[in-house]
Image (tube, rainbow, N blue to C red):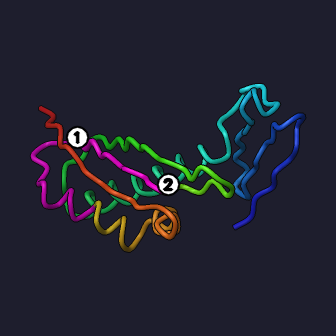
Amino acid sequence: MRATIKWLDNVSFVGETETSHAIVMDGAPDAGGRNIGPRPMEVVLIGTGGCTAFDVVHILKKARQAVSDCVVELEAERADTDPKVFTKIHMHFVVTGKALKPEQVERAIKLSAEKYCSASIMLGKTAAITHDFEIQETD
């Protein structure tokens, strides 16, 4: 995997992936940023949520569960001193579908957390990661 980060100005950067997707990142205004994009650590948190959501949906579909939506709400805490790594991350999954089995949703989240999600497994080296979920029924 490859990526390129290009400095725009002040503390603004554009990251481009090898698949030609780009994201603008910026620092906080009190650090010289213009607030034109997420902070780099926000991108890390979003990437982690995307990684685990991808796994959960994929696992539920393979289990023939009628999943129609998956939202992951993340709350994170960081260390007070440099390096300000994540120390706690809580993931709340809101999984929507028809007749979803709670044990299948729980299994999908556990498999993602323990086996498949590279991002959360990596962040788990510095952060205590917890999970919970709720199921919303569709007609």
Of residue 59 and residue 126, the one placed in the foreground of this image is 126
Q: Residue at x 49, y 48 (%)?
A: 77
State which mark lies toward you, 2 or 1: 2
Give residue 83's position: percent from left, percent from top.
67, 58
Give residue 57's position: percent from left, percent from top.
33, 54
Q: Quadrant of the N terminus?
A: bottom right
Report if residue 106 lies within the magenta region: yes
Q: Residue at x 50, y 68 (%)?
A: 118
Numbered-mark total: 2
Q: Quadrant of the C terminus?
A: top left
Of residue 75 and residue 94, the one placed in the foreground of this image is 75
Element type where label 1 sits in the image: strand
Q: Residues within 10 Å of mark 1 (few under 14, many from 20)?
A: some
Element type where label 2 sits in the image: helix
| Residue placed furthest toward the bottom | 115
Between the C-alphas of marks 2 and 1, the distance is 20 Å
- Could you tell whether 16 is left or right of 54 in the image? right
On the image, numbered disc 2 is attached to which residue? 48
Which region of the structure is painted magenta? Answer: 87-108
Give residue 37's position: percent from left, percent from top.
69, 32
Give residue 28's position: percent from left, percent from top.
71, 32
- Could you tell whether 117 is left or right of 13 in the image? left
Of residue 58 and residue 42, the one placed in the foreground of this image is 42
Amino acid carrying mark 2 in the image: Thr
Q: Residue at x 69, y 47 (%)?
A: 21
